[in-house]
């Protein structure tokens, strides 16, 4: 408890924790003034990507050389020919504002990983989540003296980067022994000339 009417700061809680916290770096941003729907689509486009690949992809989107496929919130958006590169044939857009916010967040998570002395080359976007924030209220003036709400849809974003494990080579299948039933073993002995 803090005396004098001060606010107590609590630790922020992420929606999920990494399996190995030592090999992970986290970052989050609250109340971003960008469209929740666009941010959600942008986040889902980079989920599971290596960090370097995700940054170059978002850079291409800023240059309008690549597109964010709108898989869920693409109601009135037009089709884009670039979405076929993402195994999708539907609407796509270039949500510049959301991409800039996400690039900043990835940079922050990367610097958090450097502080923990993780290998930034092998980081992967393991978890990314976008939540709706409290709507911003404004008003717009309509005909005949009426007033309507004119709301903004900000969002909260959280990212967890995880250092990818080195893959272990699979053992040769030639050393694997095939199990046989008693009947099969007896038939094999008979074929070889031994008594049953």
Image (cartoon, rainbow, N blue to C red):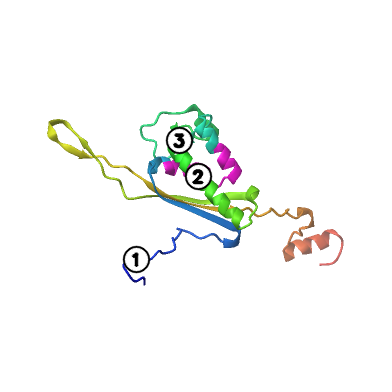
Residue 51 on the magenta segment = yes
Distance from the alpha carbon under mark 1 to that under mark 3: 39 Å
Please determine whether, in this image, residue 174 is positioned above or below residue 196: above
Q: If the image is split into quadrants, where does the C terminus sit?
A: bottom right
Q: Dot 2: what SS?
A: helix
Residue in the image at 13% along x and 34% along y: 145
Location of mark 1 (residue):
6
Distance between mark 1 and mark 2 Cα atoms? 31 Å
Residue placed most toward the observer, 55 or 87 = 55
Between label 2 and label 3, give the one nearer the viewer.
2
When the figure is inspected, residue 44 is found, relative to residue 188, above or below; the finding is above
Q: Would residue 167 appear left or right of 186 to someone viewing this image?
A: left
User: Regarding mark 1 in the picture, which secondary structure is present there?
Assistant: loop
Q: Report if residue 41 lies within the magenta region.
A: yes
Main SS category, magenta section: helix
- Tell me which numbered mark, 1 or 2, is placed earlier along the sequence: 1
Task: Measuring from the top left, give residue 110's x and y in whole percent.
Answer: 57, 50
Q: Mark 1–mark 2 contact, CB under 8 Å?
A: no
**23 lies above or below 82:** below
What segment is highlighted magenta in the picture?
A: 39-57
Q: Earlier in the sequence, mark 1 or mark 3?
A: 1
The x, y position of residue 75, in whole percent, is 36, 35
Please name the residue shown 56% across and 54% down the image.
Answer: 112
Of labels 2 and 3, earlier in sequence is: 3
- Residue denoted by label 2: 104
* Residue found at the far right of this picture: 193
Mark 3 lies on residue: 96
Relative to 58, is 176 above or below? Answer: below
């Amino acid at each position: 408890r803090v005396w004098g009417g001060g606010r107590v700061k609590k630790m922020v809680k992420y929606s999920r924790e990494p399996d190995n916290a030592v090999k992970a770096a986290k970052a989050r941003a609250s109340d971003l003034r960008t469209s929740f729907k666009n941010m959600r689509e942008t986040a889902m486009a980079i989920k599971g990507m290596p960090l370097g690949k995700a940054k170059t992809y978002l850079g291409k989107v800023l240059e309008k050389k690549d597109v964010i496929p709108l898989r869920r919130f693409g109601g009135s958006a037009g089709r884009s020919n670039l979405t076929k590169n993402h195994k999708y044939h539907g609407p796509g857009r270039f949500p510049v504002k959301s991409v800039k916010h996400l690039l900043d967040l990835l940079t922050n998570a990367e610097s958090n990983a450097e502080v923990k002395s993780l290998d930034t080359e092998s980081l992967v976007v393991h978890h990314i989540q976008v939540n709706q924030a409290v709507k911003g209220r404004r008003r717009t003036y309509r005909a005949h003296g009426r007033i309507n709400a004119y709301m903004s849809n900000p969002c909260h974003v959280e990212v967890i980067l995880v250092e990818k494990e080195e893959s272990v080579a699979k053992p040769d299948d030639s050393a694997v022994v095939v199990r046989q039933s008693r009947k099969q073993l007896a038939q094999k002995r008979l074929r070889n000339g031994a008594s049953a």
